[in-house]
Amino acid sequence: MCWLALGSAALLHAGAKNRDSTIRVLIVDGFSNHDWQQTTTLLQGILQAAGGFDVTVSTMPAMDTPAWATWQPHFADYDVVIQTCNDNGDNGLLEGVKQKPDWPEEVKADFETYVRKGGGAYIFHAAENAFVGWKGYEDMVGLSWRPAGYGTAVQISSLGTVDHIASADTHATGHGPRGDVLVTRLGNDPIHEGMPPQWLSPDIEVYYYAQGPADHLHVLAFAKDSDPKLGMLWPVEWTTEYGKGRVYVSVYGHVWPGDVQPASMRDAAVQTIVPLALEWLARRPVTYPVPSDFPTADSESVRPAPAPSK
């Protein structure tokens, strides 16, 4: 493993200040079967170290409180929204929650309008699983964690072609054990400019048979699942268009309750891709530098845990 020296982080931060004007980012959290509090803290740390981002957090109040009905994030005030909420836990319910959490209908409508009119949305890890039956959201995400036959799935062939699997031939979405995964770029795109063709990333879940409308879908990177019965290649990063808006989705960033300094968020690749994806989503020049400690096909690169200063 390669550890980033604090001096290198300072140089990256100084270089980031020379980029275009600050990108306004809204993180929406409040519920998930993952550790959403730690996820938000780690994202804040990554973006503070990157520089050039003004980050606000909007946490959905509990549904059994009056504050839930009046909760209204002002999406239009931001260049990009990072969506981390996931209501699709075991049996559809989250531990300790009396009812399945959900956004108010007005917030859902506002989010659809925001993206459709040109906003940027980063669907972060388990948020790809969320909101079964919300058509607008499923159209944005393209591929979601869903039961067999819910929609079209996408796999990557050994020749590197993107092949669609009809709903009649899908299985329920799942993943094998998390682990160190060899990620492969598929073609060229602005987010991955300057990165190697392949790299090792730690503690990744490779979802198989993620499915949905799969419209306007562009696969950016893929990896092999760890299920011994499958051993197929599946998307791990993709983008979609929703109206005039841009959407980026990836399986990076697993943070489970009880995880301490999770390698999934200390990965130098993830800490590079997050700011690059936000630049692209915000329609700014995609210029965040690819660092010297970026992982290779033979060696992962894990940094100290990012933490925002108070």
Image: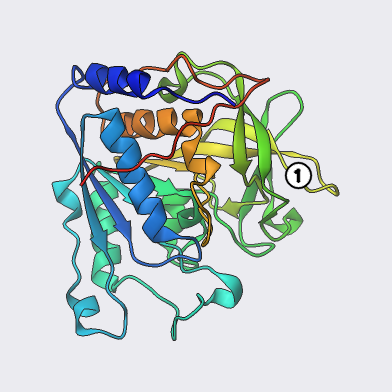
Left of 252 or right of it: where is 74? left
Residue at point 46% right, 69% down? 87
Q: Which colour scheme is used?
A: rainbow
294 vs 146, left or right, is left
Q: Position of residue 274 (x, y in %)?
A: 39, 35
**Where residue 201 sits: x, y (%)?**
59, 33
Residue at the outermost front position: 6
Residue in the picture at 56% in, 22% down: 295
The residue labelled by disc 1 is 226
Residue 270 is left or right of residue 281, and the answer is right
Q: Is mark 1 on a helix, strand or loop?
A: loop
Tally of marks: 1
**Is residue 172 shown above or below 226?**
below
Query: Quick check: 100 left or right of 17?
Result: right
Quadrant, the N terminus: top right
The residue closer to the viewer here, 225 or 301, is 301
The answer, for residue 152, to whether it is visible in the render is yes
Q: Where is residue 29 in the image (x, y as percent from the top left)?
A: 33, 60
Q: In this view, does 107 lie above or below 114?
A: below
Residue 144: image quadrant is bottom right
Residue farthest along the right direction in this orientation: 229
Q: Is residue 140 above or below residue 69?
A: above
Splitting the image into 4 quarters, where does residue 186 fall? Answer: top right
